C-alpha cells in the first residue's frame, strides 16, 4: 500500500469515528442516537423497551425461559421501522429461581405474595434480517447475536409480586447487567451503572389470558453507550501515523 492510499484510509477511518460521535450509531443494522432527548429518562444514551413471554417458577432451582422483542429504542412510541429497518431485534433468556418465594400465602389466587430472586440470568439479543417473530422461541433465536448480557456479580434479579408460583403471577423486578458478547458488546461495555455494571433492567410480568402458566410483560433496558469503540478510532490514528512515516521514508 502506498503512503497516499494509507493516508486516505487513515483519514477516512478517523473522520468516520469522529462524525459517528455526533450522529446515530449503527451496529449490525440496529441504530440509535446517544444524543436523543425524547425517551425517558433523556439522560441515558440508550433506552430500549419491549415485550416478554416467559414460563413461571414454583420453587428454588426452577428454570425460567423466555423470549421477546424490542419494540422501542430511544422513543416514546414503537419505532422498529426506524431503529431496525428491514430487520427485527428479538431476545431469548433463561434464569434460575435462587430461593423459594418469601411472603404470605395468597388465599384467593394461590402462590405467595412477597419477594423473589433469580440468579444465572443470561439474555441473548439477535438482529434478524428475515423478520418473522411470532412469539415463539425459535423465531426469537435466529439472526446474528447482537448483545449478550448476564447479571452483574453484585446482584440478583429481584422484585416483588402477588400469587408468585401460582401460574397467575404478577409483579415487577430489576437488576444490573454486564455485557459479555455480541456485535454491540464494545458499544455497551461502559461500567457506568451501579456496582460498575453496564445496563439496568426493569421488567413486569402478569398472567397470559388463554395460556395457563405462560406469563407476559414488558421491560425497560437503559444505560450509556460508546458511539465508536476505541479500536476503530485507534486504527484510524495508527494508519495516519503509518502514512506520514511512509512519506518521510520515501
Ligand atoms: Ca428470521
Ligand atoms: Ca426472528
Ligand atoms: Ca462492563
Image (spheres, rainbow, N blue to C red):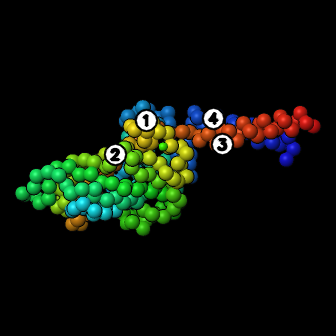
Spatial CA distance of label 2 from label 3 is 33 Å
Label 3 vs label 4, nearer the camera: 3
Quadrant for the C terminus in the image: top right
In what element is the residue under mark 3? helix
N-term mark: 2 or 1: 1
Q: Residue at x 53, y 59 (%)?
A: 144
Name the mark nearer the viewer: 2 or 4. 2
First in residue order: circle 3 vs circle 1: 1
- The Cα atoms of the two marked residues, 2 and 1, are separated by 21 Å
Q: Which mark is residue 160?
A: none
Residue at numbered disc 1: 44
Left or right of 101 on screen, residue 74: right
Q: Which residue is mark 3?
A: 232
Disc 1 crowd rating (10 Å Cα; few below 14, some 14-19, many 20+) is: some
* Residue 184 placement (x, y as % from top left): 53, 49
Residue found at x 88% / y 35%: 247
- Judged left or right of residue 125, residue 232 is right
Q: Which residue is mark 2?
A: 155
Mark 4 highlights which residue?
19
Q: Earlier in the sequence, mark 2 or mark 3?
A: 2
State which mark lies toward you, 4 or 1: 1
Q: CA distance from mark 2 to mark 4?
A: 37 Å
Amino acid at each position: 500500500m502506498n503512503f497516499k492510499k494509507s493516508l486516505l484510509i487513515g483519514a477516512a477511518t478517523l473522520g468516520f469515528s469522529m462524525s459517528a460521535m455526533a450522529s446515530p450509531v449503527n451496529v449490525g443494522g440496529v441504530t440509535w442516537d446517544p444524543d436523543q432527548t425524547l425517551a425517558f429518562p433523556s439522560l441515558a444514551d440508550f433506552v430500549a423497551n419491549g415485550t416478554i413471554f416467559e414460563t413461571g417458577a414454583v420453587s428454588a432451582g426452577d428454570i425460567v425461559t423466555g423470549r421477546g422483542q424490542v419494540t422501542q429504542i430511544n422513543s416514546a412510541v414503537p419505532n422498529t421501522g426506524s431503529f431496525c429497518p428491514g430487520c427485527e431485534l428479538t431476545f431469548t433468556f433463561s434464569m434460575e429461581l435462587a430461593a423459594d418465594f418469601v411472603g404470605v400465602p395468597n388465599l384467593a389466587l394461590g402462590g405467595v405474595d412477597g419477594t423473589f430472586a433469580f440468579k444465572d440470568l443470561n439474555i441473548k439479543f439477535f438482529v434478524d434480517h428475515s423478520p418473522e417473530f411470532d412469539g415463539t422461541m425459535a423465531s426469537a433465536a435466529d439472526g446474528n447475536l447482537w448483545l449478550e448480557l448476564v447479571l452483574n456479580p453484585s446482584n440478583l434479579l429481584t422484585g416483588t409480586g402477588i400469587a408468585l408460583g401460582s401460574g397467575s403471577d404478577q409483579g415487577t423486578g430489576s437488576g444490573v447487567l454486564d455485557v459479555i458478547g455480541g456485535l454491540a458488546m464494545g458499544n455497551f461495555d461502559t461500567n457506568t451503572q451501579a456496582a460498575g455494571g453496564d445496563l439496568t433492567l426493569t421488567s413486569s410480568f402478569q398472567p397470559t389470558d388463554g395460556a395457563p402458566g405462560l406469563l407476559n410483560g414488558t421491560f425497560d433496558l437503559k444505560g450509556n453507550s460508546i458511539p465508536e469503540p476505541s479500536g476503530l478510532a485507534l486504527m484510524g490514528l495508527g494508519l495516519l501515523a503509518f502514512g506520514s512515516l511512509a512519506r518521510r521514508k520515501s
